[in-house]
Image (spheres, grey):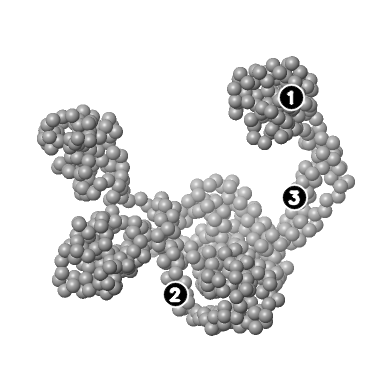
Amino acid sequence: MKTRLFLIALGLISIMLISCSPKNSELIVAKYGDYNIQLGEFEEAYAKNVGGWENAVNDSASEYKKFMDLYLNFRMKLRDAEVRNYDNDSDLQNELENYKKTVGASFVIEREIIEPGLKKLYNDKKDEIRISHIMILTENAQGDPQQLAQSILDSLKAGGNFETFAKKYSADNFSKNDGGDIYWITAGQVIPEFEKAAYNCKVNQIYPELVKTRYGFHIIKVTGRQANRNKISARHILIKEPTEADSTVKDTVSALERITEIKNRLSKGEDFAELARQYSDDKGSGANGGDLGFFSRRRMVKPFDEAAFKMKVGEISDIVKTQFGYHIIQVTGEEPYPSFESEKEALREQYKKIRYDNEYRAFIDSLKTKYGYKMEAKNIADIIGTSDTVKFDASYWDSGLQKQFGNKPAFVINNKPTIIDSLFAFGIAEKSFAGKVINKNNNLLLAAEKFSEQNLLEEKSMIMAKVNPEFISLMEDYKNGIYIFRLQEEEVWNKLTVDTNEVKNYYELHKTDYKFPDRVDFSEIVVKTDSLANEIYKQLKEGKEFAMLAKENTIRAGYKNKEGKFGIQEVAGNELAEKAYSLNNPGDFSEPFKSKIGWSIVLLNEKMPSRLKIFEEAQPEAASSYQEMMSKKLEEEYIQRLQTLYNPIVNYEVLQNAFKENSNK
């Protein structure tokens, strides 16, 4: 009994100890002054620095330690920025506000429009739908196109036959004879208005409204919906039908009889690839056993495509008739629907081309409603009516137009007016409007629309900066960055002076670091043929001037007028320079040799072996090295002052627990 009570007590103590022990993320890994760095903070910073949690988990303890030292210095610097009251520095805060607006607009577009748009496109593409439509062109000889389309839709709702109406009325000559069938599609293949209606329509139903596109009015019916198979691989045997124009088909036995015989042999177990090699009239694939590789929906002609995508892997089709002849098809493989991440860039390109513009406009319209947007149309109209010469340029600021309208509102967002002066400042700075007459081609109205869109996105970004964790984190990173930059200015760069005497002393101590490599001054004649090169070489030996022959003959672009002169070049790694350097005396020239663009002859003008640079030659490099050394010294002195002030302590052993919890985060 006592033993049992002891074990229970021991269990309770263990539970209490466990419940009282901190989580790994709450362990203190470092202290500086009155401030702590918890392991969780270190993990988040490290993971962000190395590109994600998965990368961080696999790094070594020595990498964690190295980063910890840097991160501690970073935190001490930010505390110093706090002490220096950077949060109330107007210049820094203005920079932060401008960043919120400019980067915020891009952030809003990416997070609110593009990212959800990509995911929706990805999910939509998981299904394919089969569609029929009736298209009435906007310019229609049969009367008002919308009225005609609506009357057809009403008749269909009353029980009319879709295929009959399509054959009679549809202006789409590619589908009308098939009862309007445009076959299987996936998201991203047709214009957005059409696609949106089709994907929101149930199978065997007609979309209840007319769909307006740039082509006209559409009546849409969805006839099928199924999972998108993405890509399949297949092989086939093709037997062409004999025609007068096709002299490659010589067999007098009918194509159908030949393909039927092959089908029977396949049914008895003969090898598909071998029969394709022997009999297929598609010689390209036949040589490879009929293999067509992987292909997606709609890449093959419709009858072939329809048969192939209905089959399972390994199945062999019945005889399929297409415009090319008779086929037997075997599906040999299937490529599964790819992951979102692997398709993201391709999706982005497709989304930007097809859906983005519509969804951007819809998002802007939603912001206009949400933020009480109002264009001051009367002021815009009055400005246009007042002047026919004012442009988006600096002359506006001295114009009567500015005096009359400058302080009037152009538009209002969230009860905050944006004045005409601001609109003109935008137009003058904006490349698409700068210098253009304001009342030509609706320039002023277009500028007002574009400027108001920018303001709406900035308004949204200002709100996100308060409530969106990702954006808040982004802004915090930027704030830390500009604070660190200011500290570096004050503690390093502003204190850094470059004295010529000090640079010279530095040079004297390190002069062996500054040297010229082997160099050579040379000229070249290059021609296309060895025969011409040999003729020029003969003329040089006879005493003709190299410069004259170079000006007359060299084919290297830009070197005729230079008389073939290359000037001073480093020898190492330069084929021509190496050849010139191998010559003995100035004035010597080489025999013709094969070069990259033809046959070359080089002339040695001056040979310059490697040597140390004098101070005047080395001064720019020495000054740069000196500055780098002094910057490092000032940085170390600054860190040392912070360490003296905050007396940091690092518990390196705690880093052994890094990334142990939530390793799959």
Choose the circle earlier in sequence order: 2 or 3: 2
Where's residue 184, x and y in %? 26, 55
Judge by depth and name the residue closer to the eye, 504 or 199. Answer: 199
Q: Is residue 544 above or below residue 233?
A: above
Question: Amino acid type of disc 1?
Answer: Phe
Q: Which residue corresponds to the image point at 64% horizontal and 63% vertical from the top-left?
A: 480
Judge by depth and name the residue closer to the eye, 354 or 516. Answer: 354
Judge by depth and name the residue closer to the eye, 346 or 656. Answer: 346
Q: Quadrant of residue 40?
A: bottom right
Label 1 to label 2, Cα distance in Å?
Answer: 75 Å
Choose the circle earlier in sequence order: 1 or 3: 1
Which is closer to the viewer, label 1 or label 2?
1
Where's residue 177, x and y in %? 20, 57
Q: Which residue corresponds to the image point at 54% horizontal and 80% vertical from the top-left?
A: 381
Residue receiving disc 1:
546
Task: Identify the disc placed on residue 366.
Answer: 2
Where's residue 257, x and y in %? 11, 35
Q: Is residue 530 above or below residue 233?
A: above
Horizontal arrangement in the rendering, residue 207 relative to residue 251 (left or right): right
Which is closer to the viewer, label 1 or label 3?
1
Horizontal arrangement in the rendering, residue 538 relative to residue 338 (left or right): right
In the rendered image, the residue lying farthest to the front is 141
Residue receiving disc 3:
632
* Quadrant in which the N terminus appears: bottom left
Judge by depth and name the residue closer to the eye, 584 or 9. Answer: 584
